[in-house]
Amino acid sequence: MDYSILDFLALIGSVCLFLYGMKVMSEGLQKAAGDRLRNILSAMTRNRLAGLFTGFVITALIQSSSASIVLVVSFVNAGLMSIGQSMAVIFGANLGTTFTTWIISLLGFKVDISAFAIPLLAVAVPLLFSKKGRTKSIGEFIVGFALLFMGLAMISQYVPDLQKNPDMFAFLQRYASLGFWSILIFWFVGVVVTMIIQSSAATFAICLVMFAKGWIDFDLACAIVLGSAVGTTITPLLASLSGNVAAKRAAIGHLLFNILGSIWCLILFYPFMKMIVGLCESIGLGNPDALYNFVDNLQQTDPEIYNNLFNNTLPADHPRATELSAATRTLIAMQASASICLSIFYTVYKFINLSIMIWFTKLYVRIVEWIVPTRKKTEEEFGLKFIQGGLLSSSELNLASAEKEIAVFAERVGRMIHMGQELVHMKDNDEEFNKLLSRIGKYEDISDRMELEIADFLNRVAEGRLSNEGKLRIAGMLNIISEIESIADCCYGVAKIMLRKNQNKAEFNDQIYADIDTMYKYLDEAMQMMLVLLNDLNNIDEHSLMRSYNKEREINNLRNQLRTANVANINEHKYQYQAGIYYMDIINDIERTGDHIINVADTAKDIYRRQKNASPAVLRRK
């Protein structure tokens, strides 16, 4: 056997180079697009046609259906789109993946792109040292583009020759002439290979090389490509495993789309292939199986020319050099036509599948909801709603998920304010008092864990490729979750003050209760303003910020008034000194809670406000 372990490792390395180039190209584009890509994905689901078009465009741009579907799963996970809306985007993304196959087909054989891949790197690498983030991202995109096609060229070089290595691929050759069973077997091969390398584009590239060299016929090549469409669903499925129910449903919808597509295509495989061959012949590409027949006939009739056809080792003065040159020109022409025919098959299949499935979107939703039922969870059970560890394929777009989770975090902590006010009015050592005290403690524990989980997620996102704006957003979000957790601490602090007050038998009069309620009223209003800011961080206006600052000043002023009045009330013996101490401790805790709330507003203004011309500076808290 001529194929060594080093050749096999070289093939694996070539595939890795191809995948890495695709990854760098995709991430470079996402960084260059930044917020625009996120905003497009956020606003794209107004109707099915818009979703289809956006899914197609995004996949065509980032050169990976798996990556775009993971983005969709992330958005569903983040609550930015519903299951029904995501289906149209998923359908469009499946059609968009054909764009990659056309690039590989058109440039892989007609143009020797590997010949100018190195000069392309010479242009791109200097851009990586630019101070401008977008210029640097464009450089990364070009580097990824060059590496992708360098990998494709190396795949072509190191894919083993099935004819020269019969022992290694005997299992494939043994099952290549079993009629329709061969189609099913090679379809399964396409599924498995794509699941392993997690890229239908890489599978297509390998299949194209094997087909273009005449090692497999057109039917088997199409079967592998058809299987790769199912195999590529593994990436979104893996990403959704740690996601919420909605994310799992979106990933299952993607799997369902491709499985059902494969089923109808396999049932109608031979009539469908006859149509594809007829289409190729009608546009002047000829019968794609002519390539396989040409190579097979050459091997049988002229082994010398065949053995030198792909490596061109005959010297120029060899008597048969002219024949080899003619055979090479014929082979190149057939390769170009056959590779386009393979892309036509994939495109027509995807288009027909899309045209059928788009009308059954609502049925899809019902099916995936049945497959992945909702799991009931109490509001006090810990668990993040919108972000999960598995959804990290796109650093820029994961920020939207984090923003949604922070809003949920703040809303949950906001409930503690009402619990604290309710606890103040409860009787000493009452059973309900102890229950509510325990509940507040549980909420505080959940807030600690939520802060750590969100911070861990943001730190892992920060390790990815981020634009400068994305890095600023992460810094702002880390500051916000710290402030929100401090709000929870203050709320729990009121509960502990009330516990000490009850243990020491201190008594509040009606005036103290009324003053505390007024402070809580102001605090609740400030909290509601903060929640409005967090629920729409991309559209913060000066009016909302000014209202927040004004409310915080009201809290400060009332705290100062109550502090002065407390001294007078104690001197006038309206209540005991010890009661006054606990009373002021609660007032100060509420005021500190207001400080943390306004700190969130400060961060929102500094990091997220989009207006370039800020209003005059507002009065900050003391």
Image (spheres, helix red, strand yellow):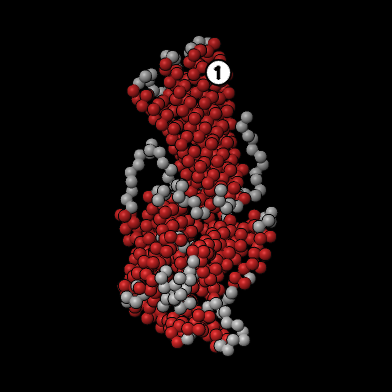
Give the side of residue 464 with respect to residue 391, left or right.
Answer: right
Q: Pinpoint residue 85: horizontal percent, then vertical percent.
A: 42, 58
Pick the front one: 193 or 92:
193
Residue 277 place in picture, x, y as percent: 41, 81
Residue 413 visible in the displayed image: no
At 34% from the left and 77% from the top, the residue drawn is: 177
Which residue, given by chain and number where applicable, does mark 1 sit on? 565
Q: Nearer the viewer, residue 134 or 311?
A: 311
- The residue located at (48%, 59%) in the rendering is 68
The N terminus - image quarter = bottom left
- Asked which quadrant contains residue 415, the reply is top left
Residue 308 shows in this picture: yes
Q: Which residue: 63% across, 60% down?
A: 139
- Specify the quadrant that holds the C terminus: top right
Q: Nearer the viewer, residue 519 or 136?
A: 136
Say which amino acid is labelled 1.
Ala
Q: Is residue 160 left or right of residue 30?
A: left
Residue 94, position in %: x, y?
44, 65
- Name the image quarter holding residue 272: bottom left
Q: Is residue 322 above or below residue 450?
A: below
Q: For this view, does 5 lie left or right of residue 602?
A: left
517 over 264 or under it: above or below: above
Q: Secondary structure at mark 1?
A: helix
Q: Badge 1: how crowded within 10 Å, few (<14), some, or many (20+)?
A: few
Q: Hey, which residue is sitting farthest front in the picture?
A: 1
Give coordinates of residue 349: x percent, y percent.
40, 72
